[in-house]
Image (tube, rainbow, N blue to C red):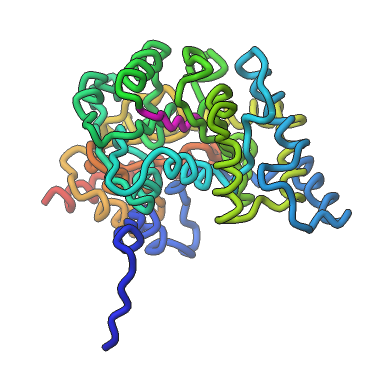
Amino acid sequence: MTDFPIRPEAADAPTSGIVDVMEAGRGRPGLIPLWVGEGDRPTPPFIAQAAARALGDGETFYTHQRGIPELRAAIARYHERLYGGSFDAERFFVTTGGMQAAQIAIRMAAGPGDEVIIPTPAWPNFAGAAIVAGARVVDVPLSDGPTGWSLDLDRIEAAVTARTRALLINSPSNPTGWTATREDHRRLLAIARRHGLWIVADEIYGRFVYDGAGRAPSFRDVAEPEDRVLYVQTFSKNWAMTGWRIGWLEVPPELGEAQDLGQVVENLVQYSTSGVPAFLQRGAVAALDEGDEFVAEQIAIAAEGRRIICDGLLATGLVDLPRPPGAFYAYFRVRGITDTKRLALDIIDRANVGLAPGSAFGAGGATHVRLCFLRRAEDLHEAVRRLAEALPAVAGRNAA
């Protein structure tokens, strides 16, 4: 048999444990799919219609690699509303989803022989992006206590070596809901400055917080223009656009001018996707300029979903579940269970509910499962009812 060798960074790309479970349950009649990070609302008409108009108008040609000027300006306006101050549109680059933004950011910061520190549990695509760039992932587990998850900053600094090039910080966190405080951001920046590191900041869930603040703390609250922070964002969550595959990357303003990071990002877009279709970008402009009411509705749905799921699962007496302060996931432990992939498969069979196994999210969370609660209330009530019936038998079988 002929041997066809491939690069180790390609061969080492990890299989998604979430997809493994989804494939086992996909297509089952009546299954309630709470295993991925999306709600059940389609993209609202005002966004879809803007894209359809552009498609009908013939915007089907090659377009700006950095994103159409109208969208980059809309992104800048959005940041000014959310964070205050002035934002230059030249800082923003439209990408094929948040995943491409993360890949570009990691590729700019680290490569073969380098290390990337990731607090875990974490969305598995972060580690995957680092691995395919040739870097080594260094997991630093979050602390799991009765009141929730927390980040040990001394543990983060202790993980830094001469090979470390970047910290990847996702706050609010997928899957735990951990949300960094302003002081956490300040101390993480201090670590990055001391060691000359990049920070890749995934703040995708920054609008989904439940303390009345309106948004989560951000590195923008404490960073200086010269700090090495690359911000990853997406349209997927706020505006129900997961299938559109459109996001953006923000580079530091001062470093962008000094090192022409903009040209670097443009080149990386050119040699991967060659840009996001223009008609999709027209829909994204509408999302930013007209979508505040829809985003508020999304947050309200998530807040109610959080209440339903946390109250319902805690009432079973079988789970450990601190109420997440951010994002839209319940990340819980079924007492006595360690094999969460087997647990998720059993839940599909016995409850017809799709959950993501904690083993998919790296060190520190393998004994948990993740449930997405950005969904209509009736589905969540039914999911809780099914889980309450199934968990005693499933827990007994898996603990045996």
Residue furthest front in the image? 258
Residue at (18, 44) in percent of width and height:
337
Q: Is residue 380 left or right of residue 368?
A: right
What kind of secondary structure does the magenta stretch mostly adopt?
A: strand
User: Which residues make up the magenta segment?
Assistant: 197-204
Which residue is at the front of the view, 45 or 288? 288
Residue at (74, 56) in percent of width and height:
62
Residue at (38, 42) in percent of width and height:
123
Above or below, 173 relative to 29 = above
Q: Which corner quadrant holds the N terminus?
A: bottom left
Residue furthest right in the image? 57
Q: Is residue 310 visible?
A: no
Indicate yes or no whether the magenta region holds residue 198. Answer: yes
Residue at (62, 29) in percent of width and height:
91
Q: Quadrant of the rendered structure where residue 299 is? A: top right
Residue 392 pos. (x, y %): 24, 45
Residue 318 pos. (x, y %): 24, 35
